[in-house]
Amino acid sequence: MKQPRVGIIGIGQSAFKPKRDDASYPDLVREAVVQAMKMPQLEFSDIDSIVYSLSPDAMVGIGNAERLGVDAVGARNKRFLRINTGGATGISAVAAAYYHIASGASEVVMTAGADKVGECGDSQTVLNKIWDPTYERSLPLGTITMLAMSAIRYAEKYGLTQEDMAAVVVKNRYHASLNPNAHLRKTTTIEEVLASRMISWPIKLLDCCPQSSGGGAMVLASEKYIRDRKLDAVWITGVGHCSESYYIGDRMGRGFTADHADAFALKGAFDRSYRMAGITEPQKQVDVAELYAPFSNTEFHSIEAAGLAGLGESVKQLREGRFNIGGEIPVNASGGTLCTNAIAVTAMIRVAEVALQVWGRAGGHQVKGARVGVASGNGGDHQFFGTMVVEA
Amino acid sequence: MELLKRREAWNITYNHALGETASHFYVQIRDHAKIVGRRCGATGRVLVPPRAFSDQTLEPTTEWVDIGTGGRVETFTIVYEEFNGLPPPPYAFGYVLLDGADTAIGGFFKGVDLSDPAKAAQALKVGTRVTTKFADKRIGDVLDFWFEPEGK
């Protein structure tokens, strides 16, 4: 028997900026919530449950900031859950909202959150604290260094130059220039990326995502609710999550099950989403993808994990333009995580952006005729991967 | 209008218990300048750094194994940017598969000129043989040892 579907009926997102001195943290959450409720003209009383999207507290500098978010999402007298899977938080939150409805527990669920990464002067210091105090805390690990080490292994395994990495930045910055909500909207060139200062070999300044401030919100509802009220919706047809084990050093050496070069469990998460959505040939069936890639090099292993290119084949295809708007399968038509990263909602925006694409509401960065979109989010050091398929 | 801000810094103290397995590992480093691993009884896989159970079989590890000081670079990075609370740049660190281990352990790389990023990256490329060096004064921490290219 086919399961009743879950639809997306509302989407809200800030125009992401480096700083938002005009808005406190809950003000930013509220900004996205108001936008998301405007799309289907909902009242707060229409919403049964809230899934709150919030990654490490230290990034916003408020312990259990979901407490402060309760009023911004109108949660009084409602079910409320906070979700945190690091960078994957946003897509995990959408998945939790989906499960509320698919289980029959709720009819209409809001997921929302915000981040003010630009207010934290020490984001890599905060992120260093995600490593265990036993064996790895004394090392200067952070998200940049951890993923620089993935680039080194990817380059060794398949071949990857700094020019190849720069091509990802050029593509995504061009896409972001078409998206008024993106944070870094200035186009760039291969030469400019290569000339930017070295941060963590081989990652340079322009290969890195920015620290963004802004909010995101989505409203999901049951198929029955949507049909009864004749609401406009797009549909979540696939949901998948998958994890890798903890230690980076176990993803190399002898007899490893997952190579730190790749995003092995992201592929596992996509396999689950595709099976649920009945997608057997992603390269033929997927029209548009929003893949969580905060550093340029990570877009390659994400494209491959999504099955949009064979292992090691995405580099050449990206340089040929296959993943540009106007190419065969546009990847990160919004500019992606590389151009906007408000961590608590980044992976939610991936889902929101493919929803806008298949809805035909993406504006200047619309991919013509997109009907099937996929989104992903990555959290921790490859511990938490989430994926979704969204269809018109 | 005039928009105000409030500055604050978090300074929080913890005393993390390392547990039996890591305590033994660090005592061997501190007192004997020796690295040890734990063998998974089910598969024979040697875990370095040592863990009480295998992440693959989920069975408790069964014996201590002495690990060699030589190894090969599995990955690395070289940091040129300063981050608050992290060491002053430049520095190189990464993961090494030590002889006798099946998993790689993290540590700093020293003995490489980091002034030219491309040259330094060549000197640390995946597969480079390295030797483990130990500090004279050791406290029982991963910073008690580091790796240098062989022949340095």
Image (cartoon, coloured by chain):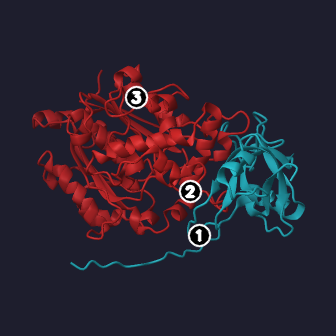
Chain colours: A red, B cyan
Residue that carries the numbered disc 1 in the rendered image: B85
The mark closer to the camera, 3 or 1, is 3
| Position of residue A247 measured from the top left corner of the image (x, y, whole percent) | 64, 47
Tell me which chain the residue with mark 1 is part of: B
Same chain shared by disc 2 and disc 1: no
Q: Find the distance from the CA under tag 2 to the CA under tag 1.
A: 16 Å
Q: Are marks 3 and 1 in contact (CB under 8 Å)?
A: no
Same chain shared by disc 3 and disc 2: yes
Q: Is A387 situated above or below A198? A: above
Would residue A134 be visible to someone looking at this image?
A: no
Residue type beneath disc 3 = Arg
Which quadrant is the C terminus of chain A positioned in?
Answer: top left
Q: Are marks 2 and 1 in contact (CB under 8 Å)?
A: no
Residue that carries the numbered disc 3 in the rendered image: A322
First reached walking from the N terminus: tag 3 or tag 2: 2
Q: Is A134 situated above or below B57? A: below
Tell me which chain the residue with mark 2 is part of: A
Residue that carries the numbered disc 2 in the rendered image: A199
